[in-house]
Image: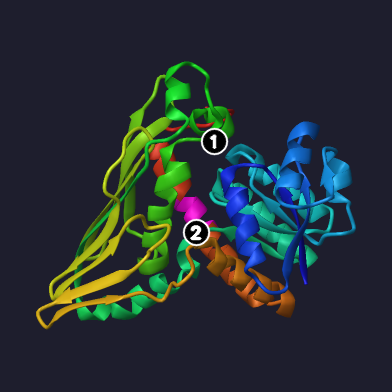
Amino acid sequence: MMRIGTVGTGFIVDGFFDAVSRTDNAEVVAIYSRSEETAQAFAAKHNLTKWHTDREAFLNDPEFDVVYVASPNSLHFQWTLDALKAGKGVICEKPFVSTHAECETLRNLAQEKGLFLVEAITVPHLPNFQLLRDHLDKIAPVRLVQLNFSQYSSKHKAYLEGKNPNVFNPAFAGGALMDINYYNLRFMLDLFGEPEDIRYFANLAENGIDTSGVLMMTYPGFVAEAVGAKDSRSENMVQIQGEKGYIKVPKESSRCISVTVVTQEGEETFNLQADDNVLVYEMREFAEMYRTNDLTKRDDLLEMTCRAMKWLEKARKDGGVYFEGEK
């Protein structure tokens, strides 16, 4: 049984609780928040009797084995590092960390200590994403890829009013690329592998953070364009164009709710995802990995994550987005 303690009280943690409740061999037994009032309220919301406000006491609590890290982005590395040092496994929310070097440090420590460590990122675990890969040959060769994940942030108004929320704050490793366009980047990397080059054309705010932007990725024989925005909204989609047809995914890349393949022979739509909470698919895979102590699968996923961190950092700095202490 994977027994979990959670860090963070944002909406993503609510989704995580729901995913765990639909997963065999996993349960959340405790939460952490710096605020006693917040910790009590969040624990009560999820029918838990155990909560912590002391970081050291939380990390050394013997009642759980795995820490789920959903703190602000800039805190992911230290929370994960401290949890691993305390002998806990870790499920860390996307984006895993801020730099490739941080990713390598955490991977090395997890491997050295034989501990569970994964990034919570929906894309590679979605059944429809796997299905899409199986249908690429029907439209090959690929020539163009377009992705758009734009969602007007509930925090944007606060940012415009000068309140500096975490998601628009360089000190907390925020920005559209880290928060939303990362899904598009993972979609491309996990489907097509590493590009020949990547560029990021960002709309930069006064504090240097990207509120929206466009990733351009070049591969042998084709080009991909990935739009991510938190200052505006759009009809989200993925479209892969090939010489024999095209594949389209409605909505955002993070969910991949269905796959439609269009060729000269006609149009087919597929959907293998019955669950409305897409976090379920990664959580079930993580629980099974933990139950069987599948360190090979852990290493495969960590390799994918570290590869993504390398290209994420390269793209971010290409777009002129630097976090606290990087300049």
Q: Residue at x 62, y 68 (%)?
A: 22
- Which element is circle 1 on? loop
Q: Is residue 57 visible?
A: yes
Confirm whether the magenta stretch covers residue 309. yes
- Toward the top, the furthest residue is 162
Foreground residue among 201 and 181: 181
Q: Residue at x 83, y 58 (%)?
A: 87
The image quadrant that residue 248 belongs to is bottom left
In terms of sequence position, does the residue under pointer 1 or pointer 2 come before the other? 1
Foreground residue among 3 and 307: 3
The image quadrant that residue 150 belongs to is top left
Q: Residue at x 83, y 60 (%)?
A: 64
Q: Which residues are magenta?
A: 306-311
- Toward the left, the furthest residue is 264
The disc placed on residue 173 is 1
Q: Which amino acid, mark 2?
A: Arg
Labels 1, 2: front one: 1
Residue 83 coordinates in the image, percent (x, y): 78, 52
Separation of residues labelled 1 and 2 (CA atoms) = 19 Å
Residue 107 is left or right of residue 201, and the answer is right
- Would you name the residue on which mark 2 appears? 307
- Picture layout, residue 36 above or below residue 97: above
- Toward the bottom, the furthest residue is 265
Residue 183 coordinates in the image, percent (x, y): 43, 54
- Picture layout, residue 121 above or below residue 152: below
Callout 1: few (<14), some (14-19), or many (20+) C-alpha neighbours within 10 Å? many
